[in-house]
Image (cartoon, rainbow, N blue to C red):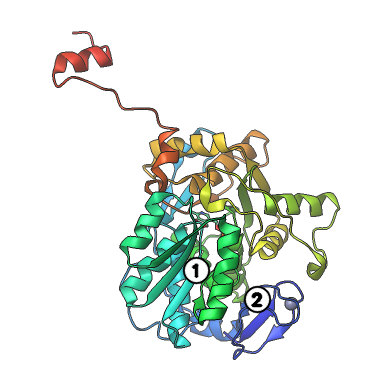
Amino acid sequence: MNGYCCIACAQAQSVDFADFVCPACGGNLEITYDYADIREEFVPDYDYAPFLPVSRLDAPFPLKVGRTPLIAAPRLGESLGLRNLYLKDETSNPSASTKDRASAIVLRRAMDVGARTIAVASTGNAGSSLACLAAALDMRAVVFVPETAPVAKLTQALAFGATVLAVRGNYDDAFDLCLKASDEFGWFNRSTGYNPFTREGKKTCAYEIWEDLGRVVPDRVVVSSGDGNLLSGMWKGWRDLHAAGLIDRLPKIDCAQSENSAAICNTVRRLRDQGDSSPDWSNVVVDEVKAITVADSISVDRPRDGLAAVKSILQSGGEAITVPDQEILSAIPEIARSTGVFAEPAAAAPWAAVKQLADNKTIDADELVVCLVSGSGLKDIASAATAVGKPLAVEPNTGSVREVLAISV
Ligand SMILES: Cc1ncc(COP(=O)(O)O)c(C=O)c1O
Ligand SMILES: [Zn+2]
């Protein structure tokens, strides 16, 4: 890395900058690189060290973060007439969500600056991820979650030995509290978006998709969004490859949100309605909503990397898609039954969004589409259970099985 640049006002900071957000306007920062150097150093083969802002990458990480499968999903695609649909299955990360990519880079950064206690605000996954990786590295994690977070995510964080603070409030309250507590107690704050290193971890997913596809750029990558950091990370990954001269086109990044938590999509639509697809970013205010969605991971009132996400969607020409909660829930068994991948609600939202794009003919049958499956269905069994029916109850004899299945001999 060679410095930072503010997403809002574009003010640059030197590589030695020790704070998290822009000192001029409070905006989130993007880490910058000298791409000519990277071009010289980089050899494609799943080693992204030249593109990463941390040292000690030669020391092996104790857990396998990233290198997740890219799965062709022909049967799922066929149901909409799509011939080139893929899933990037992030459920196979150590804590079963894509958040591990961000945690790995933030923990490396924490080591670089000599921090040992890392705090995070989380809807659940960032917290369980930080707890998991911190346990592997013998570091201390302090996790702020809304008290309503799914029990599996809380239990993961506790099992990994994190200090878990269940905040009587929502994710936004947890975020603000984590910020204040980190300042007061001197903890290194991993919170999404606020810490510019989270985006740098998430971007590695784009590099892998490119390599997995045989160094081909897809037409669309569909990402679910709460804070918007996952989405802006995905866009950063493709921009990095482009800036380093490794690819000559960019994909559209489509944003999937619940219609009950749609701050980013609302903002994109507003700007497009105003005919303002490349506004003065320092004047753009991202909408706030009162979020209430079954997809807990993307239930966010005030997106903490919202501007970066809005910018990514508009710059890439992607769609802003909002889907009803019921369609997010139905998407869980649809994905599972035709691919064998079990998604939590937020991770099923991209498929629900693709269905909407196909229905309104925004997407062509031959487009190469990648849906990011960002977290495992095992993290929120209660939600999945509402969409998958009940087991068939039988007596322990085959007569009962025959009866229940209505098998005639
Ligand atoms: C499974 C899953 N998908 C998507 C997201 C959205 O990421 P972001 O909040 O950066 O938009 C999250 C964030 O918690 C998540 O846990
Ligand atoms: Zn700024």
Of 83 and 167, the residue lying toward us: 167
Of 16 and 293, the residue lying toward us: 293
> How far from the left and from the top, in percent, is residue 355?
58, 37
Callout 2 crowding tier (Cα within 10 Å): few <14, some 14–19, many ≥20: many
Q: Which residue is mark 2?
A: 29
Q: Which disc, if any, is residue 120?
A: 1
Q: Residue pushed farthest top?
A: 409
Is any atom of residue 278 visible in this view? yes
Residue 406: quadrant of the picture: top left
The answer to whether marks 2 and 1 mark residues whose Cβ atoms lie closer than 8 Å is no
Q: Earlier in the sequence, mark 2 or mark 1?
A: 2
Say if 68 sits above or below 30 in the image.
above
> How far from the left and from the top, in percent, is residue 269?
76, 49
Task: Left or right? Give the position of 33 relative to 125.
Answer: right
Residue type highlighted by circle 1: Val
- Ligand 2 within 8 Å of disc 2? The answer is no
